[in-house]
Amino acid sequence: MADLKSRWLALYVLCLGDLMIVLDSSIVNVALPSIQADLGFSQSALAWVVNAYLLTFGGFLLLSGRLGDLLGNRRVFLGGVVAFVAASVACGLAPTSGLLVVGRAVQGLGGAAVSAVALALIMGLFTDPAERAKAMGFFGFVMSGGGAVGVLLGGVLTGLFSWHWIFLVNVPVGVGVWIAARRVLPDDEVVEQRGRIDVLGAVLVTGALMLSVYGIVETSAPLIIGSLGLLAVFVLWEARVAEPLVPLRLFRLRNVVVSQVVGVLWAAAMFAWFFLAALYLQQVLGYDALEVGLAFVPTSVVMAYCSLRVSDKLVMRFGIRPPLVAGLALAAVSLALFSRAPVDGTFVTDVLPSMLLLGAGAGIAFNPVLLAAMGDVEPHESGLASGVVNTSFMMGGALGLAVLVSISTARTDSLAADGASAVESLNGGLQVAFAAGAVAAALAAVVGGLFLRPKPMVAPDEVPAIGEPCPDVV
């Protein structure tokens, strides 16, 4: 029992560290107007408060995962927390726009290290199928619910205090995580052959990922084409090098590949939902920062309940695919409902139903996605697989946000040219973007339902006979 208690204590520490990282992908959205006013950002430069974080975070995930396998996941996790906390102090105290952007880039580096190995550490701690399902449900809430919690916390801190606190709040949390992690995380296993880091492979894939994110956020076709070229060179190099950064055999694992596709589509819908929903509340319904944050409370509560109390039970009773499909279908319905939100909408009738469905869908679906992705991977490559999983979500989120915002902007401009008012034009653009997000979530459900072939979550000697009830997981 003591051993089980210590494993769950370690899980809480890992999840708190990862939550701190996930929050920073969305916590700044509500505070951007205040940051712009204080530091004098131009409208175009303001996007770099978000983009600088995405660039380094996405670019260094695979390298961080590989470093975890070679140097030890615990060591990389602790180093990432230190870098993230130091960068958070720099961001919170930044006197100029340039220093804030640099601080955000360093935050991304630290965040990549923490996120790339946290999932691998959890998979190593929990080997029993039932325990792992519950643990991954908890971690799934952190990963999927972090966006909603980030919007909530960003609105509250900015509304009650100032934008500086959206960064400074990381300091006590990060220090606590670092101290607790040193006490509760298991020591790294001694690796006889450290292996060599594939330097050229690391440079190629990091450059390709950073260039692709940069191309996406800047909507630059030449940059995206260049990133694809770098990625092709990386694949050719990995096929020839003796100790590759990413063994290509990983992509012969069916569930790994399918999970990446599902993750990209799912994250595209999720990231866009958080961003566009906050935009609808602020610029169409006229909510202030605090009201926007509070509006996301129902999503966070429902997501937490479904992740922690429902998802693991569904996985153990029905397997991975049915909960995955059901959760993603609920998310698709949520986005479809938001695509009908009118200019004069009310919270109870036009916002709350979508909030509740999104919370339920995300809470149920995220756990199965992670379990499917990590189930086929050998323990010594868990850090790499964790980095691949996080990369697919980050790239899907960045791509989805860029594409759906572009769709929204095009529709808004078209309506404005036809004589619609500013608010009507903006709302029309948001409606089209929400509809596109619903299609992405629905497509993720179809791909996962048709192509995933996950391993059973119950040991063979625990499978009930036909006609007997499945064991309940408490």
Image (cartoon, grey):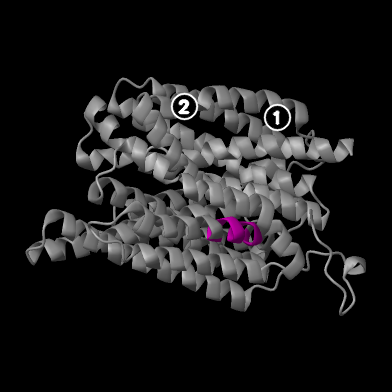
- The image quadrant of residue 184 is top right
Q: Is residue 435 magenta?
A: no
User: Of residues 398 and 1, which is closer to you in this image?
Assistant: 1
Locate residue 359, reporting x and y percent.
Answer: 52, 55
Q: Secondary structure at mark 2?
A: helix
The region drawn magenta spans 361-369
**Residue hosting label 2:** 88
Position of residue 467 in the picture relative to residue 25 (left or right): right
Q: Is residue 155 above or below residue 87?
A: below
Return the disc, 2 or 1, that comes first in the chain's sequence: 2
Residue in the image at 59% along x and 39% along y: 18
**Residue hosting label 1:** 181
Locate residue 392, reporting x and y percent.
Answer: 53, 57
Q: Secondary structure at mark 1?
A: helix
Locate residue 419, reporting x and y percent.
Answer: 6, 64
Residue in the image at 43% along x and 46% along y: 296
Q: Is residue 18 above or below residue 464?
A: above
Amino acid at circle 1: Ala
Amino acid at circle 2: Ser
User: Of residues 177 and 73, which is closer to you in this image?
Assistant: 177
